Image (cartoon, rainbow, N blue to C red):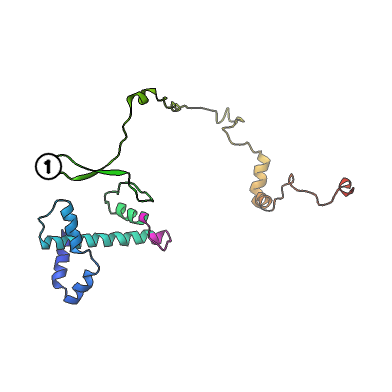
């Protein structure tokens, strides 16, 4: 309400030129009137519609500013829908629910509700199932039961050689790596492992043709 009062006060103090510039940056009143009529709110005055227009415009501007922050934080040049949804979550808006389909065909059918309203509602088209097919259908697989497995980390201060425990490294290797840490890195970088080095000198059998 405070935001609406400030906007109303600002509108009264604006000149004609300022009002023309602001009109290009806000929602048209006809859109707000259409949304109100769709929600059965036909008895709205012009002043109320003007306040709602200002409120909707301000909220969307704030959301776009926050979404732009997410876009820049992710080092992107184009804003995506995830940025706008993140901005809505940051301002504690209700989440957008529904289907996201690339082809645009929603799996809904339109029906008329019974009662005094006779409003058109959308629902999922449920298929009828035969009882015989449900009875004769095979049962689904039983899910795996939760099981726990224990193993020894150490027995009397010694680590057992089992698959669950890490590989045992000798003390000499640990000492050599700690004294010369670049030794192991050099082997990995230049592939200097002794088991993988091949001699460049051909043996006698390779020279026979």
Residue 75 inside the magenta-drawn segment? yes
**Residue 165 horizontal/vertical position (percent):** 57, 33
- Give the residue drawn at x 18%, y 45%: 119
Return the residue at label 1: 116
- Give the residue drawn at x 88%, y 49%: 207
* Crowd class of label 1 (few under 14; some 14 to 19; many from 20; radius 10 Å): few
Q: Quadrant of residue 168?
A: top right
- Magenta stretch, main secondary structure, is loop
Viewer-side residue, 140 vs 153: 140
- Give the residue drawn at x 67%, y 46%: 176
SS under mark 1: loop
- In this rendering, the answer to whether 173 lies above or below 51 is above
Q: Quadrant of residue 81?
A: bottom left
**Residue 44 horizontal/vertical position (percent):** 11, 57
Residue 36 inside the magenta-drawn segment? no
Viewer-side residue, 206 vs 159: 206
**Residue 180 horizontal/vertical position (percent):** 66, 50
Bounds of the magenta segment = 71-81
């Amino acid at each position: 309400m405070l935001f609406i009062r400030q906007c109303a006060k600002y509108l009264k103090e604006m000149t004609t030129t300022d009002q023309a510039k602001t009109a290009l940056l806000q929602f048209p009143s006809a859109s707000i009137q259409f949304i109100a009529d769709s929600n059965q709110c036909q008895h709205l005055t012009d002043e109320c519609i003007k306040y709602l227009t200002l409120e909707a415009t301000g909220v969307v501007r704030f959301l776009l500013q926050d979404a732009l922050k997410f876009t820049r934080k992710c080092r992107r040049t184009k804003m995506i829908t995830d940025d706008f949804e993140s901005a809505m979550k940051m301002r504690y808006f209700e989440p957008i629910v529904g289907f996201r389909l690339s082809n645009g065909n929603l799996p809904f059918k339109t029906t008329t509700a019974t009662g005094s309203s006779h409003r058109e509602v959308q629902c999922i088209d449920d298929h009828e199932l035969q009882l015989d097919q449900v009875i004769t259908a095979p049962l689904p697989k039983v899910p795996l039961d939760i099981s726990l497995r224990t193993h020894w980390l150490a027995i009397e201060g010694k680590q057992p050689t089992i698959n669950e425990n890490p590989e045992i490294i000798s003390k000499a290797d640990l000492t050599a790596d700690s004294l010369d840490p670049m030794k192991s890195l050099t082997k990995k970088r230049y592939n200097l492992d002794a088991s993988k080095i091949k001699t460049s000198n051909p043996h006698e059998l390779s020279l026979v043709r």
